């Protein structure tokens, strides 16, 4: 059984997890323009202290900004059930790189699969290719079940205007994190199956839904995840089983489970992010559904140990960013997370 620590030990693990979570959120914000948000807030504070005439001009700018935001929503927000990843775009995406990468998709797929087998002892298949600022981002899924999702990067040579297929690389820790979550699921298949069934039943009963599975495949790239949740284990706590997997990719789940339990992995070492969407277009996130999800999950026994953060979105997802999080999203996070031991 995975145990929970008391006192200082648990506090340290919570702090580590929260630092990681904040860093991950900041990374997302930076990717999509965190600096711009800060600049807007700074400017707004400064303009508020200026003359009435300048305030009027700022109000006009705000109206224009609201109109632009409205246009963005109309153009990019789609129903989550219909979203399969089409329209996804990285910040500063280079469409020319994407075009050339797609033209070389066979060579890229071969090179990426070779890279994963050499460095991670894992066979993958390419699910999508998108352009980045100076490279192609290649989304992949594991061939072996249960699936995990991650990505590789193939750089672009601007001087020769060609994809550098021999330069395949990955982001530090990204693939490792995906494999950690996958190993955790492999160690406790019955517990994960119970969690999956609970969320499927809950979605049917309360008119909510998860992501379209095709979107998870095509633009997920976040680790071990499915249409309902993402798993993020702390790297150091899974280092032992990860090394065991690299030495023996055929390692059995029972052996992984024994190593995790012997190494003292605790509930605070594994973060689950559950994200659901309202099933009907136009429906606002319902607090009563969020409350029922929290209550039901708290009472549920026999699911994977970890800390569970909950999000309930409306029915729309931003197709460019593959995100459903908005100002009206209901959240049960931070100190209110559910801890399952």
Image (cartoon, rainbow, N blue to C red):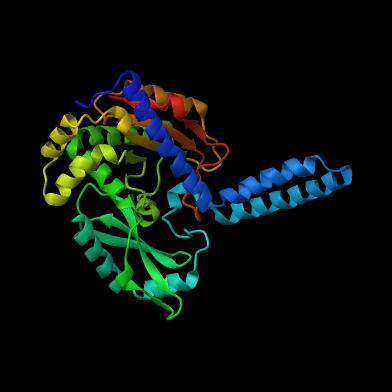
Please determine whether, in this image, residue 217 is positioned above or below residue 288: below
Q: Give me the residue at 49% from left, 41% from top.
A: 280
Residue 96 pos. (x, y %): 48, 73
Q: Quadrant of residue 119?
A: bottom left
Residue 320, image x, y percentages: 50, 56
Q: Residue furthest top?
A: 7
Residue 269 as seen in the image, left or right of residue 1: right
Asked if residue 195 is positioned above or below residue 183 in the image, the reply reads above
Q: How many marks?
A: 0
Image quadrant in which the N terminus is located: top left
Q: Residue at x 51, y 27 (%)?
A: 287
Q: Quadrant of the C terminus?
A: top left
Q: Is residue 105 visible?
A: no
Which residue is at 79% across, 46% downward?
59
Q: Nearer the viewer, residue 313 or 103?
A: 103
Left or right: 217 in relation to 252: right
Between 341 and 40, the one nearer to me in the picture: 40
| Residue 36 shows in this picture | yes
* Between 245 and 273, the one nearer to me in the picture: 245
User: What residue appears at the point 16 percent right and 51 percent down from the top-left corner?
Assistant: 246
Residue 218 x, y percent position in the rendering: 37, 57
Q: Give residue 283's quadrant in the image.
A: top right
Q: Position of residue 125 (x, y in %)?
A: 26, 61
């Amino acid at each position: 059984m995975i145990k929970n620590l008391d006192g200082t030990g648990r506090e340290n693990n919570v702090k580590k997890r929260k630092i990681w979570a904040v860093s991950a959120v900041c990374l997302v914000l930076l990717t999509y323009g965190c600096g711009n948000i800060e600049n807007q807030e700074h400017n707004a504070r400064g303009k508020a202290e200026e003359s009435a005439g300048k305030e009027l001009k700022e109000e006009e700018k705000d109206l224009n900004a609201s109109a632009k935001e409205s246009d963005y929503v109309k153009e990019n927000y789609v129903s989550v059930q219909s979203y399969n990843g089409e329209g996804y775009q990285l910040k500063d995406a280079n469409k020319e790189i994407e075009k050339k990468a797609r033209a070389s998709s066979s060579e890229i797929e071969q090179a990426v699969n070779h890279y994963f087998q050499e460095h991670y002892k894992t066979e993958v298949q390419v699910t999508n290719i998108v352009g980045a600022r100076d490279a192609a981002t290649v989304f992949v899924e594991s061939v072996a079940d249960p699936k995990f999702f991650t990505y590789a990067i193939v750089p672009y040579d601007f001087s020769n205007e060609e994809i550098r297929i021999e330069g395949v690389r990955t982001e530090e820790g990204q693939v490792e994190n995906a494999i950690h979550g996958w190993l955790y699921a492999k160690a406790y298949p019955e517990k994960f199956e119970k969690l999956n069934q609970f969320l499927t039943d809950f979605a049917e009963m309360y008119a909510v839904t998860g992501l379209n599975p095709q979107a998870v495949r095509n633009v997920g790239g976040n680790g071990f995840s499915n249409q309902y949740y993402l798993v993020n284990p702390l790297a150091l706590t899974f280092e032992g089983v990860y090394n065991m997997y690299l030495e023996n990719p055929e390692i059995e789940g029972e052996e992984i489970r024994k190593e995790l339990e012997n190494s003292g992995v605790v509930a605070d070492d594994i973060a689950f992010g559950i994200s659901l969407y309202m099933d009907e277009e136009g429906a606002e996130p319902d607090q009563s559904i969020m409350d029922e999800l929290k209550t039901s999950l708290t009472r549920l026994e026999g699911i994977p140990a970890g800390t569970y953060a909950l999000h309930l979105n409306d029915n729309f997802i931003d197709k460019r960013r593959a995100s459903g999080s908005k100002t009206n999203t209901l959240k049960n996070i931070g100190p209110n997370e559910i801890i399952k031991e």
